[in-house]
Amino acid sequence: MAPDVTINNCTISNIGLRAQETVGIFKTAFVRDLTSAVLDIVTIQPESYLEQARVLVNAVKTTPWGVAIQRLLMFSRTAYDYTTFITECTDVKFKYNIDIMAHVSKGAFGLRIEDTVGLCVENVAVKDVQNISEVLYPRVEYQLPKSAIVETFITSPIDQTSDYAYGGADVRGIFIGNCRGYMLTQLTLTNICCQQGICNGVDIAQSHNGHIHVLQTSKLSGLITDAVHVHNNCDVLHLRDIHNDTKNIETYRTLLEGVLKVVDCVDASSTESQQQEAFEKLTTLLRTPSTDNNILAFESPSSIAQLRLC
C-alpha cells in the first residue's frame, strides 16, 4: 500500500483506445505459440503462415491434441472446421475477454489509482478520453458451432451483459480501487465516452473512508453512464456538490424495466423458439446505447455503510 499520495493541479487529456480482443483455445490451460502468446482464433486462419510456423515449432509432441491443433492450423475451414476439431478434442473450450497474453481487458482510464493509504486528488481535469473498442461475441463472429464451449475468462461478470461482457470496451474518467482515506475535490470530467461499454466518470471499488467534493461532469457517453459509480464493497463515503451536465439521455431504470419484461415472459416451460426470441430481445436491449441520468449509481446501496450526501 502506497502512503500519502497527492495528485494536484494537472490535466489529463486525449486518451484513445481501440482494444483487440483475443479468443483463446483452452485445454486445462491456454494453447500458446513459440512467443508465449495465446493461440488466437482471430489470427489462426489458414493463410496466416507466420502464426502457423510459431505454433508448429512449439507443438512438438505428437499427442492427439497436438495433431488436432496442427490440423486446425494447416487445413482450410472447409476441409477441417471447428466442429471436427471439437469432436477430436471433446474438452476443448474457447475463452474470450482476454488479450493476447491472457490478461483481462479493462478498457480506457483517464486516471487509475489503486492500493493507497491517504490519497488526495485536487484540482484535476480529465477530458477527451475515448474508447472505440467493439463488443464481439465469438460464437457468432467466428461461426463456432453450437456444440462448442464458449466461455468468458472473467470469473464473475463485470457488467450487466453477462457473457457478452467485454471490459475492454469500458471507459472511466477516474478509477479508485483498494484505497483507504481518500479525498477527491475540485474535479472536472469532460468528453468521456465509449461506443459499446460502460462509462463512469468516477468509479470507486473496494475503497473506504472517502470524500468527493465539487465534481463537475459533462459529455459522458456509453451504454450505461454514471457520473459516480460506487461498488458495493465500499463504506464511509461523503459526497458534496456533484454536478452532471449530460443532456437528453434515457434512464437506466427504463432499460431495466424492458429487460424485466422480457425475462418475466420466459420460464422453464418456454419453447426453444420462445427462448431464442427472448434472447434476441435481451441482446438488442443491452446493446442499444442508453445511459443513466441519475448522478449516482450504487450496485447495492444497503451494503454501503455510512453513505452521506452533504
Image: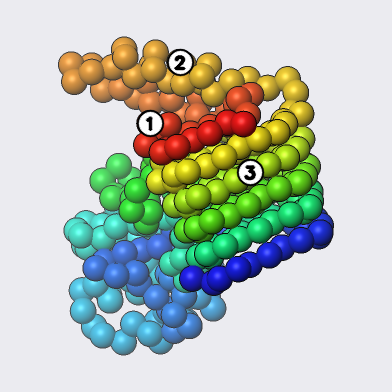
| Residue 216 occupies quadrant | top right
Closer to the chain start, of discs 3 and 2, is 3
User: What residue sits 54% from the left and 56% below the top?
Assistant: 181
Q: Position of residue 150 (x, y in %)?
A: 33, 49
Rendered position, 8 above or below 202: below
| Residue 48 occupies quadrant | bottom right
Closer to the chain start, of discs 1 and 3, is 3
Q: Nearer the viewer, mark 2 or mark 1?
A: 1
| Label 2 residue SS | helix
Q: Around disc 3, counting alpha carbons within 10 Å, would you say few (fewer than 14), some (14 to 19), or many (20 or more)?
A: many
Residue underneath mark 1? 302
Residue type pointed to by label 3: Ile
| Label 3 residue SS | strand
Residue underneath mark 2? 257
Closer to the chain start, of discs 2 and 1, is 2
Residue underneath mark 3? 212
User: Is any atom of residue 295 visible in this view?
Assistant: yes
- Residue 8 appears left or right of 291: right
Q: Around disc 2, counting alpha carbons within 10 Å, would you say few (fewer than 14), some (14 to 19), or many (20 or more)?
A: few
Q: Position of residue 75 (x, y in %)?
A: 40, 67
Residue type pointed to by label 2: Glu
User: What residue sits 34% from the left and 82% below the top?
Assistant: 59
